[in-house]
Amino acid sequence: MSNLPLAIVSHALPNDWLAMLKDRCQLLIGPAELEAHLSEAEGLFTLLTLRVDEVLLSRAQRLRVVSNMAVGVDNVDVAACTRRGIPVGNTPGVLTEATADLTMALLLSAARRLPEASADAREGRWATWTPTAWLGADLNGATLGIVGLGRIGLAVATRAKAFGMQIVYANRNANQEAEQTLRASRLSLDDLLRQSDFVSLHLPLSSETRRLIDERALRLMKPTAILVNAARGGVVNMTALHRALSEGWIAGAALDVTDPEPLPADHPLYRLPNCLITPHIGSATRGARKRMAELACENLLAGLEGKPMPHCVNREVYNR
């Protein structure tokens, strides 16, 4: 019997993404292995689709480390892990550029009505071409409001500036780099919503930010404004957003994240021509996802070896 610690990867991943785990732990991969061997596991490598809650943790009596292959850890009950002395790792930094690229893709697609225009082209409606058909919004000279100016928000602001956009932001703290290099202006959230032609959300999900963009917030926005969310679906009240798009409070929305995820196929937002939805692909580039997996491996191995994780969201467990 091997003396190596047992680690479970909750879902199948490419072998080369997990290469550094070879010969350093007993590795089991997939939902079936998780179900069968959770009680024996000392390490758990998780994706956002797995809930690490009290129910799971109560079955994992030997668990010493949870390594989440994501920046956000809203699928993990971090407080419950902390009570058990279990460090929780995440993978920040490596998906910044990929997510910023996707945010701009969403913004551009919604601004220029690309899904609608593509559908018309496929269905032979070019014959209806007129100078006023498929009119979109201009980016050059428009104001982009960024809510949450962290790494990803700043990367989006840098890209948007290259398109000639004016940058305003709402953030707990001032960002001197953005103000000096991008001439960004810090506003209250209400003023940002009132002034922006595009609003891009880059907030973590917490009790403070859950449904931050609600009916009141959406009614503050311009009727010509477009909302972009590549953060977490729970930051937006989806019922209020449907009303806003249906009744013309705002012009459009582009969402890479929803609440819930996945969004049911019969959800009314899918039927709105002014709502673009993608299936949480912000980090979906080959390079970003591979590096995320490698960071998650590094966190997992550190935890199994009793060392501090390179990226830990509950470092207080090390003070015990």
Image (cartoon, rainbow, N blue to C red):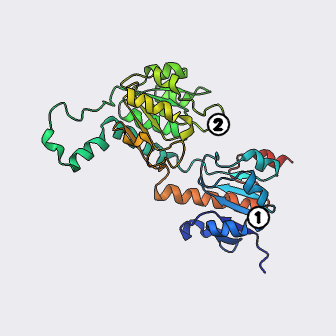
Which residue is labeled 1 in the image? Answer: 42
Q: Position of residue 266 (x, y in %)?
A: 43, 46
Q: Which residue occupies the foreground of this view, 180 or 231?
A: 231
Q: Secondary structure at mark 1?
A: loop
Q: Position of residue 319 (x, y in %)?
A: 84, 46
**Which residue is drawn at the image coordinates 55% and 20% (left, top)?**
188
Q: As displayed, is residue 142 above or below residue 162? A: above
Instruction: Name the residue type under label 2.
Output: Ser
Asked whether residue 279 is in view, the answer is yes
Task: Tell me residue 292's x, y (percent).
Answer: 57, 56
Residue sitting at x 82%, y 47%: 83
Number of other residues with Cα within 10 Å of mark 1, as a class: few under 14, some 14 to 19, many 20 or more: many
Label 2 sits on a secondary structure element that is loop
**On screen, residue 249 above or below 318:** above
Q: Name the disc covering residue 206, or none.
A: 2
Name, please, the residue furthest toward the bottom: 1
